Image (spheres, coloured by chain):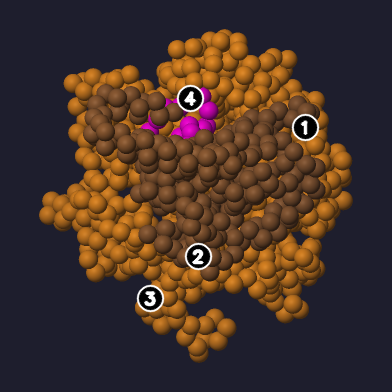
Chain colours: A orange, B brown
Amino acid sequence: MTNHWVDIRNADVVLIMGGNAAEAHPCGFKWVIEAKKHNKAKLIVVDPRFNRSAAMADFYAPIRTGTDIAFLGGVINYLLSHDKIQHEYVKAYTDASFLVKDGYGFDNGLFSGYQPEQRNYDKDTWHYQQGADGYVVSDPSMQNPQCVLQLMKKHYARYTPELVEKTCGTPKADFLNVCEMLASTAAPNRTATFMYALGWTQHTTGSQMIRCGALVQTLLGNIGMAGGGMNALRGHSNIQGLTDLGLLSNLLPGYLTLPKDKENDYRKYIDQRAKKPLRPNQLSYWQNYEKFHVSLMKSWYGDAATKDNNWAFDFLPRLDKVHDILQVFTDMHAGKVNGYFCQGFNPLAAIPNKAKLTEAMARLKYLVVIDPLATETSEFWQNHGEHHDVDPAKIQTAVFRLPCNCFAEENGSLTNSGRWLQWHWKGAEGPGESKSDIEIMATLFTRLRDLYRTQGGAFPDPILKLTWPYKVPNFPSAEEIAMEYNGKALADLADPADKTKVLRKAGEQLDGFAQLKDDGTTACGCWLFSGSWTQAGNQMARRDNSDPYDNGQTVNWAWSWPANRRIMYNRASADPSGKPWNDKKKQIWWSGQKWVGSDVPDYKPDAAPDVGMGPFIMNPEGVARLFGVDQMQEGPFPEHYEPFETPIGTNPMNTNPQAVSNPAARVFKEDLAAMGTSKDFPYAATSYRLTEHFHYWTKHCRINAALQPEQFVEIGEDLANEKGVKPGDKVKVTSKRGQIVAVAVVTKRLRTLTVDGKKVHHVGIPIHWGFKGLTKPGYLANTLTPFVGDANAQTPEFKSFLVNVEKA
Amino acid sequence: MANDSLDIIRRSATTTQPPDERRHLEVAKLIDVSTCIGCKACQSACMEWNDLREEVDSTLGSYDNPRDLTAASWNVIRYAEVPTGNGGLEWLMRKDNCMHCADPGCLKACPAPGAIVQYSNGIVDFQQENCIGCGYCISGCPFNIPRFGPTDHKVYKCTLCSDRVAVGLEPACVKACPTGALQFGTKDQMKDYAEQRIADLKERGYQKAGLYDPPGVGGTHAMYVLQHADQPSLYSGLPDDPSISAWVSLWKGPAKPIAAALLGLVALGSLFHYILKGPADVTRESEEAVEDEERP
């Protein structure tokens, strides 16, 4: 979230789209209710299903699954053509006036530079024009046809309300009503917050859906404002922490990136990432990349990381390609993976196309499952009748099941969607032989290290030289690790303002990432978390909820990354002269000497407004990018592409067979063959979660099992009538990849939509059942889903696929 | 034990008036249907606090699970899909539980001394140790709330967490409610709060929004804020105008002295019968037959 949960109460309009907060985030949803109760907020829900959030909405609009860009592109068109944008904000805080390279273009579904054989783009033309000084060229009048605003207008002019209706199935009047409600927040004293979750991420166009929402919010001037922002509601209680700490194949902690295969020149590696400003007087904060990187390497390798060995640069693995779950399971399926560790992960249930996964895991030599529960994955080799029909005699994989604690059985911090690191204390001992995840991994490490010590290996240094300073080597404490993430001084740190003063003595905890150095005198395990455990103690354990400005920022409650800042880009909550756009919701302002306010400024604290520094300090241009330059895989502007399995077979936005679905999506050839068409699988299916359960965990818990005991699918009344299905009947749901049988919930909440002249029925498939646990045994819903992913994040398309439904 | 409490103001099948020395404020639970997301946290919390474990049942084609109130499910959310005039839809989710009537039909109907009590704060509570399993409370309840336990054949329902309330805590369901749809306080506070909610709903176009505190049972200590207070039955059959069955009123009203006299005559007759004929032998079969008839 750019903002945070409590801040939602400051919104005037709340849009829930690509998520279902009331269903999946009931505790956070209370802030929507607070906004309604105390701020007279209006709630809009746009979703294929009239869901629990819709039940609370002031206005609900239906939409066909997977067409959110068409809808949001239509909103952009509405805002631009009705002149409903926050003009001063757009002019000062975005790239609207920048000129784009002449070669850039878009034609019939494809942007310039498409390479069909590789299914990707040469992004050379996706850039701003730069002058001889290296700075971008702009036209402050924003009339130049090559400026971002004009290109944006042109791109989205095609997204008319009629085409939105034709593509999304949203009645035109409903669509326009949503546009008007959102447009009301273009006024500087009104804000809308956007709340989304996996309903946006889990599409082959997921990242661009989110970006499209961000464009709307930027045009409305709602980014950086209290009650505004782009707010990703994270799926697990600590999944934010997972990404922050870099647990993805291409990342290092704090969103630093692994060097690529051929990146062996340390200086080039740094320079590539430490972007120089694209306009005068910009902060371009990533210029500090080397400080973060060197401090990370000092934290990992201590004295073994020296200036002479480029801070152990060669100890880092090189990235040949992104090893996302689709890639890894495809490799596993091809027999290229020997062993696999699942820590708090139930891939058989959580990844699409169960048949492929089962075959893939059967080709492993060994599988290790570290989990508090007996997961489906850990029993993938067992026959569970109709729900998992395999022949154990044909599976030779050795499976090791290591029982671990759950979060409530250990100390630690959880990072919530709002970027708050909140410390928690052990509530009980883990049962039986369970061990903490840390103990399991640490013991594994020390044993591997012993093997390297005694038997050597191809390249033992990265293992043998890793710092391991913990009191109990096989069981580092959560406290030790948290302090390591915060970072400490390795030598006395002089105050840059007054060299005679020592800011931090050697060995002391750092106050924040501003103290990090690239000369090896600081160590920090994750620069973004620096400030969370200072010399003053554990900031994450703070529980002071006082709110002196009565705006919900509570800066003394726990600790929020970065730098305890509650609202990101909060410099944009004030106008260019430093005066809040809205006095009632002010965040920070210029006092005459520095930036002050109810939040930690997301800005250089002493940069006077007339310096002209932009509020988006992480971007080298200092402003928000309406034009995404080369950062996205499938284009600088979000464009609607159909789901890989589309119920209409064509893309109403173009006539190009190459551009029906995302031309740059993550897809493997063998999986393309497993895509169904609307001829055999006529219904648009979408999978989702229910309030009563959490993923595949709570079916192991008696009370939750009683609350939603048996697998069901939801179908609309029209489809039920066509098929002769009554509520409670069993139905067979089939996709190109498999079938499940479940009870039918027949509902008015799934409306038949008219799309491109055709009737489209949706089938809703909640995911929570499986062949383990206390609920009635069921099928894993991902038996049905397609093995294809987003072009940028590789997230599978769980939310849009095709099925057939028959009475069982 | 609870029967000796000075907090009790009414006691089933008891003619002596309980001491009336500790008149406390009346409490109430307010169920704001307009902010209820039907998450069932209240159901879960109720089972946790009261140490109940409902059976894992099957799904009948709706979100209603457990599908009805039972001796182990003292509250359930009931889901209703209600089309609106303009082609729209409302999904109304109502938490169904004991309403804790000011004039409780269950207590009136109960023939077992002290099996049902009403505390001075308004909570109506069942005392299973005094329950004879006759089920009259079920017929006496205008909201169809009490349920037989499958093994002990005694009757159970929501206690409004009288044990928690007695020590100054809110009921478990209220504590667990994530959206604040459930509120707890004095009845007056809850009415005030409801007024704010109703004003908000009216501003949002629900002209008939209102408080459900039905006078037919003397008002209740669980109240609803309804978007459509003119049509309570939209909410999965919430009674439009609940009142205590005429039979119960008769049984505990004018008929009571006659019934008592009849009972006395029967007792007298039995005594004569015993003196003249000796003790009656009741066969196992006839006992079971009687029990079967009593089952609903």
> Can you tell which of label 1 and label 2 is closer to the viewer?
2
**Which label sits on residue A174?**
1
In the rendered image, the quadrant that contains the C terminus of chain A is top left
Please say if the residues under marks 4 and 2 sit with CB atoms less than 8 Å apart.
Answer: no
Q: Where are the magenta residues, as a range? A: B56-72
Callouts 3 and 1 in the same chain: yes
Mark 3: which amino acid? Leu
Horizontal and vertical percent position of residue A455: 13, 51
The mark found on residue B60 in the picture is 4
> Which amino acid type is marked by label 1?
Asp
**Principal secondary structure, stretch drawn in magenta:** loop
Identify the subunit bearing mark 2: B
Front label number (1 vs 4): 4
Identify the residue at horizontal 42%, vertical 75% (top origin): A537
The kind of secondary structure element at disc 3 is loop
Q: Are marks 3 and 4 on the same chain?
A: no
Pick the residue in front: A503 or A271: A503
Q: Residue at x 74, y 64 (%)?
A: A585
Q: Amino acid at mark 2?
A: Pro
User: How would you rate the neighbour count of disc 3 (Cα within 10 Å): few for under 14, some for 14-19, many for 20 or more?
Assistant: many
**Residue A730, label in figure:** none
Q: Chain of mark 4?
A: B
Query: As shown in the figure, which amino acid type bears the numbered disc 4?
Result: Leu
The residue tagged with tag 2: helix, strand or loop?
loop
Q: Secondary structure at mark 4?
A: loop
